[in-house]
Amino acid sequence: MTTTYPPAERAAQAREAEAHLATSGIDGVVFGWVDNAGITRVKSVPLAQLEHAAEHGVGAVPCFEVSLVDDSFTSTPSSTGPVGDLRLVPDLDRLAPLAAQPGWAWAPADRYAQDGTPHPGCQRGFARRITEAIERRGFSVRAGIEIEWVVADATGAPATTAPGFGMTRFIEHSDYLREVLRALTAQGLAVLQLHPEYAAGQFEVSVAAEGPVEAADTAILVRHTIRAVSARRGLRVSYAPLFTEGAVGNGGHLHLSLWRDGRNLGHGGPGRHGLHPEAEHFLAGALAELPALLALGTPSVASYLRLVPSHYAGAYRCWGLENREAALRLIAGSAAGQANAEFKCFDAAANPYLAIGGVLAAGLAGLAAGLPLPPETVGDPAALDGAERLPASLPEAIDAYEKSAVLRQALGPELYETVLAVRRAEAELFAMRTDAEVIDATRWRY
């Protein structure tokens, strides 16, 4: 797991990084973080300023705590508007030269108050806290996020309409995909799969599982890299939940597995499909909180235009072995290390730190309570009597979120209330717009 260091150690780490990066032709470093609306924000410094930035941080305007997808703002009792400042501190353990942006390196950032204490609204800090809570129980989690995106030409139209998963689409864009693959690999990422997806112009990449915070970091780096490769070829990229009305959308499926003493608790156990009791309790806790978790993992008004039955989006609150219409898909895998659970209902509008941290908090609550996993759903839940739909709109998800004591306690009062304020404001922002208008307004924002 990523480690937090005191300022003097951060400065020493930065001095070593500067010396190495200078010999690699790096001129500046980009610091990235993700706001509560799911927008990735950045600041950068010249390489010569990296030591100062690592030790003291760089200014981060607090108004972005309450920014919306259209760059407007809402407010909370704790928000300060134009007053005050936070410090953005790069995590140099994840420092990576950007293969598709020569001369630049990237690092994810944590946010601190001016006095050096962790900012309670830092989503990355939230994911780290919950990860540490799981580790104190003697468990660890391996996680990864699938990245789906639509490639468009300069006019904004999908760059290919060749068949989904088709050889034709792959051949048409093989040079582009090779550049993506090379860039990700050059940055030290272990790519597992890269292929055409179903919707027009859509592709997907999967990378190797890692710790929860690291998995969220990697998701941001992968998206940053794909966008940069695309821009160099004159292409546009959309990670929005839905690119075209009525089509299959872009997911941000979260995969995770629970481990103890080097053993994957999703494999070789006495429970259903090899689950160990602890894995059942963990998944039961996540499933119990899933309607509320949509406010973190499926957070946009546009998300609910994607989250519909018969679109492999996981619109039903149920689980099943290799069931791609269930919100929680259990993957047995062919080896012990491969077994995992996939949250299909999440999409790329999510702040990945919030999505991962929320699921871990819910799973931890399930472990503590010894929750039983409900009966498995076999077959398409849309064809079954009594199958429970997940919230079908952002206001419904907000209602579930407000009722969740688990998420309120895990997030802490400031982050919980800020997320709630942003969700309410975006629901109001788009309340009177048609589906097509919502898609148009969000297509290029994420």
Image (tube, rainbow, N blue to C red):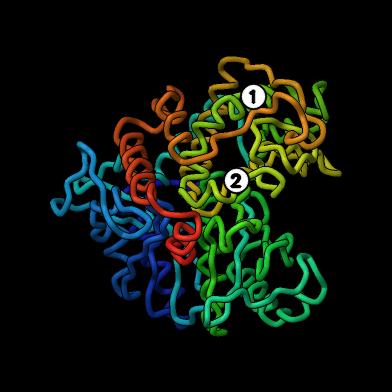
Residue lying at the far left of the rendered structure: 83
Disc sitting over residue 284 in the figure: 1
Residue 185 in the image, given as x and y percentages of width and height? 65, 69
Vertical position of residue 232 compared to residue 81: above or below: below
In this rendering, would 199 be left or right of 376?
left
Amino acid under disc 1: Ala
Which one is in front in this view, the residue at disc 1 or the one at disc 2?
2
Nearer to me, 150 or 123: 150
Q: Which residue is mark 2?
A: 307
**Residue at 51% over, 46% down:** 213
Q: How far apart in space, not on screen, are marks 1 and 2 (Cα)?
A: 21 Å
Q: Could you tell me if the residues under marks 1 and 2 are in contact, i.e. CB atoms within 8 Å?
A: no
Residue 442 in the image, given as x and y percentages of width and height? 45, 60
The crowding category of the residue bearing disc 2, from other C-alpha atoms within 10 Å (few below 14, some 14 to 19, many at least 20), is many
Answer with the quarter of the image where residue 433 lies: bottom left
**Residue at 53% over, 41% down:** 356
